[in-house]
Amino acid sequence: MSFRNIMTSIALSAVAGVASASAVPAPTAEPFPYVADRFVDIEVLRYPVPDFESLSPQQRLLVYYLTEAALTGRDILWDQNNRYNLALRNLLEDIYTDYKGDRNSAEFKAFHTYLKQVWFANGIHHHYSMDKFVPEFSRDWFNAAVASLPASKRPANLSEITELIFNPSVMPKRVNQAEGEDLILTSANNMYEGVTQAEVENYFNALKDTTDVSPISYGLNTRVAKIDGKVVEQPYKVGGVYSKAIERIVANLRKACAYAENPSQLAVIQKLIEFYETGNLRDFDEYSILWVGDTDSRVDFINGFIESYGDPLGMTGSWESIVNFKDLGASHRTEVVSSNAQWFEDHSPVDPRFRKPNVKGVTAKVITAAILAGDSYPATPIGINLPNANWIRAAHGSKSVTLENITRAYDEASHGNGFNEEFVDDAAMRDLMDKYLFDTDNLHTDLHECLGHASGRLLPGVDPDALKAHGSTLEEARADLFALYYLGDPKLIELGLLDNPDAYKAQYYKQMLNGLMTQLMRIEPGKDVEEAHMRNRKLIAEWCLDKGAADNVMELVKVNGKTYLRINDYEKLRGLFGALLAEIQRIKSEGDYEAGRDLVETYAVKVDPALHQEVLDRYATLDIAPYRGFVNPAYTLVTDDKGNPVDAKISYGEDYTDQMLRYSKDYNTLSR
């Protein structure tokens, strides 16, 4: 199961390796250059890392080596996403750098745009829709460009790569979630080989012991394949799958050990190294427990096979890393939330049987992201709650983080884009959003991550994977509903987290508008909603629209030919959030797959084509990119006259294409 929160309605938010000095961009003067690139449906931003210079030299060196460990895992994710991705990336980059023709021609510009799409998605399939990219350059142009390359740069499987690019029927979808289909055979990711969905499910069902109160996260760090007619797991570890990349990750983690802030942090890093060396998921659980327990270190990180959105069965973790340090000032908000975790749990609208009688170890903080990598780059979450293992969360607690320098970058780059004026026809609501949406966005993330994912419990003997392909959608809905329910609670005013009893309405309006309408900008005409977070938001909004119809809680109305949202009773809407939260918690606690599937298929998948086209037409007048991501800052190691590391420096300004080419050169571990 995957626990994270991603930036979803950017318009409504009031909202590196060792390098020589010449290889790293110089610091850029104010104003900060947020926008790095824009192409097709994507805008690439930069994010500042405030207070990096206030860290001690030891902490900056720790960040540096953890950053190196993060960037070194890049090729793992590319290969997990599709078995051709690395060879494809090499070929496309060679064409781009070696091309001697007219670089201002329409064909070359279309090729460069395609390459930028592939970079952004870490492969040939869109990072959100999971559909394969459609090239706007011709096959003839591509063949001629390939023919102009030296023979050494033409891959042996060139014909297969060419078909993959130009034949829409070849591997059309990276992760397929269509009900009634074999989700493994119809998904183009590289986490399975030669096996069917039934074979995988039967294999893991035979391994699981329902009496085990501390089960490992089955399949988290393995590729599942059929060899000589037998289903086997091939572990990601030193000496196993992805060994070359993992060896370099481990080497940088060992260097980071020398700069650990305290013994607890050192133990965390050393245990992660051990896990990478053994591939044993018991070692991963021990690492997770140590990581949860390290609450004193300012610098922190995630690194490994963690979130499972890239697996249609929600088991195998995609490789990712985020290096960060605590925002000391902003963390007061999350500390207030986490210190009151038991109150929120006790007053949850769910059946008391499904509540945690003793909430343990819920810690939360606001962090400053220092580097994004793997499945968190270029598109990134804005909040994370880990670990994912239910039994560890129950027995040892969890850590929740909000990436506020990321949300701030979104906010700064969104001013004046015209979205609110187009989709919100109530001037009073626009004013409320302008005043409170940034704060309620961050508070929603805090509640979602810190309390939502950490709340509730499974009944004894319930399989954590019982909800199968719908598990991620339902888990994200559960966390969102928890956050939405409590955003409207007077307790937040009492705790000083909000200063206006109506502030929550801005977030309610945003979330319902997004779920019912505006997120459709990300869907192609005729397509269903498939991504788990989008399904979550649609499920909540459509269910509330349906169940609240009798009381006219909210409605979609036409004004001058345009559709707008009206919320007529915010208190009753909050009650609906509580009722749906109670039902989804019951589904999870009891492992009721059928009820969960029915909720998702009824409310979260199908799109009204007329409303969809209207949303697309209205967005087209605004020139707003549906998707955003980031380029990273660059870090430079500072050494003394004997070559010993003494510090690390940060710089900004590198553009998107240059960063991607540099990463392919400096962190290419698996493809050449």
Image: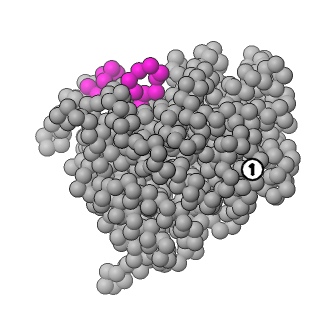
How are the residues colored? one colour
Residue drawn at x 74%, y 16% as measured from the top left: 561
Q: Position of residue 396 (x, y in %)?
A: 56, 60
The residue closer to the viewer here, 284 or 337, is 284
Q: Position of residue 352 (x, y in %)?
A: 71, 43
Is residue 644 rendered to the left or right of residue 394?
Answer: left
Q: Position of residue 614 (x, y in %)?
A: 65, 19
The residue closer to the viewer here, 133 or 552, is 552
Specify the farthest residue to the bottom.
Answer: 641
The residue closer to the viewer here, 432 or 561, is 432
Q: Specify whether residue 169 is painted magenta.
A: yes
Q: Magenta segment, principal secondary structure?
A: loop
- Residue 548 can be seen, yes or no: yes
Residue drawn at x 67%, y 32% as measured from the top left: 583
Residue drawn at x 64%, y 38% as measured from the top left: 585
Q: Amino acid at mark 1?
A: Asp
Q: Label 1 crowding class (10 Å Cα cut-off): few <14, some 14-19, many 20+?
A: some
Is residue 498 rendered to the left or right of residue 511?
Answer: right
Q: Specify whether residue 262 is painted magenta.
A: no
Question: Which element is circle 1 on?
Answer: helix
Residue 108 position by quadrant: top left
Judging by the rendered image, the residue that carries numbered circle 1 is: 346
Image height of 382 relative to 134, above or below: below
Is residue 468 rendered to the left or right of residue 626?
Answer: left
Residue bounds of the magenta highlight: 163-184
Image height of 585 relative to 529, above or below: below
Q: Position of residue 335 (x, y in %)?
A: 69, 62
Is residue 8 rendered to the left or right of residue 142?
Answer: right
In this rendering, the count of numbered labels is: 1
Image height of 303 relative to 44, above or below: below
Residue drawn at x 18%, y 42% as measured from the top left: 153
